[in-house]
Amino acid sequence: MGAHSHSHDNIDWDAHLQRLRAADDFLEPDITEVVAKLLRPEDRSAIEIGAGAGGTAAVLAKRLARNGGQPQLTIVDTAEQLLAAAGERASEVDGVTVRTVRADAAADTLAEEIAGAGAPPNADLVHAAFVVHHLPDQLAGLRRLAGLVKPGGRLAVVEFGLQTRVLPADIGIGGPGLEARLLSASEQWFQQMRTEMDDSVRLPKGWPKAMIEAGLVEATSFSYLIDRPAPLDESGRAAALRQLSMLRRDADERLAAEDVSALDQLLDPESEHYAGNRDDLYYLSANTVHVGIKPA
């Protein structure tokens, strides 16, 4: 969940935050490693675009605290509940000034809203994970985020690299290859979401090239692997189940009835085929971090 326009109506925030916190805990080792690559020893400030439940913000705060000085962390999102949760978690780190700002990364007033909330208007690192692909005009979004970076600082945009896989090729119900069909349906959903978004603009180029067009230099990318082999522990099984639950979205419209039935059985704790009872689930995914430098 990022700092961009979404309908937050009818969300069960307690359940939503619980899921987000569980995901944060599961991914903390990977996020810690990424943040260690992004935050330089001399960095004293960061802006996190998209609050989630605060897992990444907390890791950023810990790294900034290690750097010393008078570190400042600003967390930006449109959802008050997410901001409150993220701000609370990041504020548990001593020695870092944490501010939360309710603002929209899709709005041209983003920088003004951050400054108007009393937060520093720019930072050594601006970090946006899984946010930009939700913005109607992604290139304009990159320009907006680049405007928040201090000269010599960096913008880091995290986007999906390889699709997450958790299931064996043949799960014993339905036809083999269920996960591949689920992932194909998910990609179709994403492309439809982009197409139907109000004022949607295509981005027919790779992220590093788009970053250069947004005014940054020396744009590079690196990927990190999330690799949890079978058998998974409890947190790993929960992560795999969250992934399968996400793939259930719009499955009725895009998959054969046999595949929907198989997925429902995997997600049903009362079913003999419940995925949570399997010892052959794994979690394998890769995300890509695109980094550009603001000219000094």
Image (tube, rainbow, N blue to C red):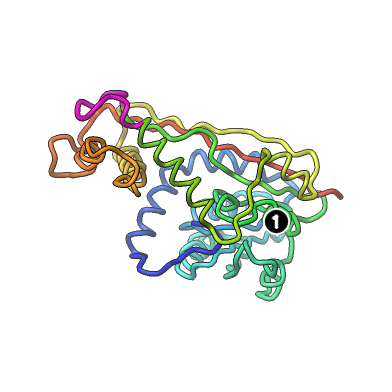
- Residue situated in front as seen by the camera: 58 or 78: 78
Measured from the top left, where is residue 47 in percent x and y?
65, 58
What residue lies at 79% left-to-right and 38% top-to-bottom? Answer: 218
- Left or right of residue 149: residue 256: left
Measured from the top left, where is residue 149 in percent x and y?
75, 55
Number of disc labels: 1
- Left or right of residue 138: residue 239: left
Instruction: Name the secondary structure under disc 1.
Output: helix
Amino acid beneath label 1: Ala
**Magenta span includes 71:** no
What residue lies at 63% left-to-right and 48% top-to-bottom? Answer: 202
**Magenta span includes 172:** yes
Among all residues in the image, which is located at the extreme right? 296
Part of the protein shown in magenta? 168-179
Residue designated by label 1: 140
Crowd tier of the residue under label 1, counting other residues whose Cα lies within 10 Å: few below 14, some 14–19, many 20 or above: many
Measured from the top left, where is residue 60 in percent x and y?
59, 51
What residue lies at 68% left-to-right and 39% top-to-bottom? Answer: 205
- Name the magenta segment's main secondary structure: loop
Q: Quadrant of residue 223?
A: top right
